[in-house]
Image (tube, grey):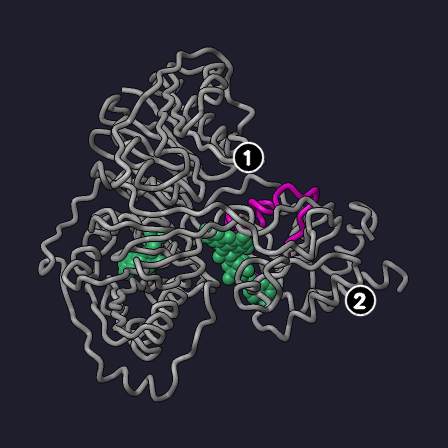
């Protein structure tokens, strides 16, 4: 099976976010970045399917030059090659525009299966995979917790709300959005890291793909949310905070 | 020119009923209808939905569309998208609203794309401003807010975040039901969907717990879980966790709180090293009192916390264990 995995580079989870001067995005200078968490699970799932059924795993990423770090990590973990849609100003594209870039590059590969994460940690649209599927005319299923190859295609386990699940049979090619926790992530081996350097990374631009930014949705302003809740913050050293909290639990909330 | 609210139907004990978030989306639709001076209609899709449509007809709406078809008996993205694309072509709405449920995540982006549009997902507020609609949504898992503007002609699409609007605000009234028969072919539905199921019985029932100590990724490593376990033990609390802790196998899945775990409402919910993403908040914000310990003063968890400690959990929790012991005379 030829599997394409969409991976996105996002600011590290522990980053202290600061707004940039335009007020439309965060200041990304000096921010550490990492692979979007569910995308790491999507990549792992692709690698496991390949190990079972053979084929090829191709990582697909749209992002600035520094995203090559995340791509290299995917190659070190076992992706066979990668496609980097290099663009320093992806913010000019809306969700549909980015999905068009990804879908166009994907179409050139005619994969059997496309995996994406279910949601990005930065923009959090939770949509890109589904939009790609529609652009490519493929069936899709979201929030996937298990993938099995069948004679007719694949059988997936979809997460529903409140602890429910559901199986679905889907013909290939198809798009799946993968939920965190579907598998156990591997680490890159030293050998893998060495081999990654020799693997092919195909670079494409929006011009190569022939897709302009014509957003019909724009992000006008980014800001800190206003607190609605009156939280009582407990000041002091850790010991003082702990003592005060124990007192509150005992005498105000009365649970001790 | 109208607002359409797409209501979600769920099967409960082999009876069709409403997904509770549908009413929140409907409240948003009615509020915007007043502000924008537009008629509001609700849509329900399925098979055997006459009673549900009748229930909607007792709300303050200009119309209720009941899309009935055998092929809509169970949800599929293909079926729902085709049926709603047909309705959108017929009524040409300005704005289409959905509750931001798992099902809506599955088909609404597809519907918007089919119509060449962008769904603005997980919206916490919609404002009418000069020059158009502004939709507020969260970035970075709730750490920042962003204003999105949908420009050009409609239809615009937005899904409403859980808890952003209040179901009780839905106004009663009366509306006419129009039954719509969509053009659907069995061959256009590419997937085969199985019946919903639950994994084996939950051994842990957090819903009955009075006290919950809940741990998130701030705990850093599996070995550190013992620290919060000890706190839970001395407090007499149940131990719970955010999703990544269970994904990593540091605690069993049945201890997960949130939209894909359990929904709890203890007297006290003590959130330790949990950022407070919406999928976690929906599972615990009904708690009587929420206490949060987090090193980041801007963590969204403080948005729902009654008491907050900004600090390093590795300093605060050991001290708290001692203080709780003292307070209990242990
Ligand atoms: C469809 C879907 C369903 C989901 N379902 C669920 C669900 O049911 N339950 C759930 O929990 N999540 C769920 N999630 C995931 C959710 O979006 C978040 O990713 C998750 O809740 C984050 O967990 P966390 O807060 O533990 O981790 P993080 O977001 O990484 O937060 C860790 C926190 O710890 C703090 N911290 C770090 N070090 C320290 C320290 N030394 N002392 C004090 N504080 C510290 C940090 O400041 C940070 O706020 C779901 C997501 C999706 C898309
Ligand atoms: N710029 C990008 N490059 C590669 N994959 C992406 C990109 N943006 C989104 N994706 C994929 O789409 C998923 C969902 O993203 P989103 O719709 O932004 O929540 C992510 O988990 C990625 O797998």
Residue A3 position in % (x across, y down): 27, 66
Q: Is residue A184 above or below residue A228?
A: below
Front residue of B155/B85: it is B85
Of the two numbered discs 2 and 1 on the same chain, state the one appearing first in sequence: 1
Disc 2 chain ID: B
The subunit letter for the residue under badge 1 reads B
Dot 1: few (<14), some (14–19), or many (≥20) neighbours within 10 Å?
Answer: few
- Residue named by callout 2: B322
> Label 2 neighbourhood size at 10 Å, few (<14), some (14-19), many (20+)?
some
> Is A237 in the magenta?
no
Q: Is residue B132 above or below residue B296?
A: above
For the residues labelled 2 and 1, the Cα–Cα distance comes to 51 Å
- Residue drawn at 44 percent across, 52 percent down: A167
Image quadrant containing the C terminus of chain B: bottom right
User: Which stretch appears magenta?
Assistant: B276-304
Check disc 1 and report the residue beneath it.
B14
Instruction: Give B128 or A151, whichever is nearer the viewer.
Output: A151
Q: Residue at x 42, y 42 (%)?
A: B103
Tell me where residue B268 appears, x and y as whole percent.
Answer: 72, 48
The outermost residue toward the right is B329
């Amino acid at each position: 099976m030829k599997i394409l995995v969409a991976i996105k580079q996002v600011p590290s989870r522990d980053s202290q976010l600061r707004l940039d001067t335009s007020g439309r995005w965060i200041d990304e200078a000096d921010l550490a970045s990492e692979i979007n968490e569910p995308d790491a699970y999507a990549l792992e799932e692709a690698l496991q399917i390949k190990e079972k059924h053979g084929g090829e795993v191709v990582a697909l990423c749209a992002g600035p030059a520094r995203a090559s770090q995340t791509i290299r990590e995917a190659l070190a973990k076992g992706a066979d090659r990668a496609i980097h849609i290099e663009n320093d100003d992806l913010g000019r594209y809306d969700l549909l525009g980015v999905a068009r870039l990804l879908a166009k590059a994907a179409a050139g590969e005619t994969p059997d299966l496309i995996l994406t994460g279910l949601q990005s940690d930065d923009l959090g649209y939770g949509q890109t995979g589904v939009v790609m599927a529609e652009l490519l005319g493929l069936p899709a299923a979201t929030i996937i917790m298990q993938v099995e190859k069948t004679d007719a295609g694949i059988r997936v386990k979809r997460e529903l709300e409140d602890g429910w699940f559901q199986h679905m049979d889907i013909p290939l090619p198809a798009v799946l959005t993968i939920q965190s926790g579907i598998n156990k992530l591997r680490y890159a081996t030293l050998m893998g890291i060495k081999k990654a350097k020799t693997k092919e990374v195909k670079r494409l631009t929006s011009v190569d793909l022939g897709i302009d930014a014509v957003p019909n949705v724009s992000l006008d302003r980014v800001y800190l949310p206003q607190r609605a809740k009156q939280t009582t913050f407990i000041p002091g050293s850790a010991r003082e905070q702990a003592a005060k909290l124990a007192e509150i639990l005992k005498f105000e909330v009365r649970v001790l | 020119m109208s607002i359409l609210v797409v209501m979600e139907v769920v099967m409960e004990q082999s009876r069709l009923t409403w997904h509770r978030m549908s009413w929140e989306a409907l409240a948003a639709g009615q509020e915007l209808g007043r502000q924008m001076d537009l008629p509001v209609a609700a849509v329900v899709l399925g098979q055997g939905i006459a009673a549900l449509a009748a229930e909607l007809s007792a709300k303050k709406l200009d119309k209720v569309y009941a899309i009935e078809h055998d092929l809509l008996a169970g949800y599929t993205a293909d079926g729902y998208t085709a049926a709603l694309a047909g309705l959108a072509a017929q009524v040409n709405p300005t704005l289409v609203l959905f509750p931001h449920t798992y099902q809506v995540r599955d088909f609404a982006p597809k519907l918007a794309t089919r119509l060449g549009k962008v769904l603005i997902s997980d919206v916490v507020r919609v404002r009418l401003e000069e020059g158009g609609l502004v939709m507020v949504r969260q970035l970075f898992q709730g750490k920042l807010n962003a204003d999105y503007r949908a420009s050009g002609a409609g239809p615009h699409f937005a899904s409403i975040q859980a808890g952003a609007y209040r179901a009780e605000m839905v106004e009663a009234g009366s509306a006419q039901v129009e039954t719509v028969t969509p053009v659907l072919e069995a061959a256009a539905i590419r997937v085969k969907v199985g019946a919903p199921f639950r994994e084996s019985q939950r051994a842990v029932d957090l819903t009955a717990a009075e006290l919950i100590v809940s741990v998130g990724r701030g705990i850093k490593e599996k070995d550190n879980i013992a620290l919060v376990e000890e706190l839970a033990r001395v407090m007499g609390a149940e131990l719970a966790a955010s999703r990544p802790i269970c994904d990593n196998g540091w605690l069993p899945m049945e201890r997960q709180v949130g939209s894909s775990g359990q929904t709890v409402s203890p007297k006290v919910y003590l959130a330790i090293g949990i950022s407070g993403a919406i999928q976690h908040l929906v599972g615990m914000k009904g708690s009587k009192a929420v206490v949060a310990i987090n090193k980041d003063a801007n963590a969204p968890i403080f948005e729902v916390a009654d008491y907050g400690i900004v600090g390093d959990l590795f300093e605060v929790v050991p001290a708290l264990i001692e203080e709780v012991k003292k307070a209990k005379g242990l």
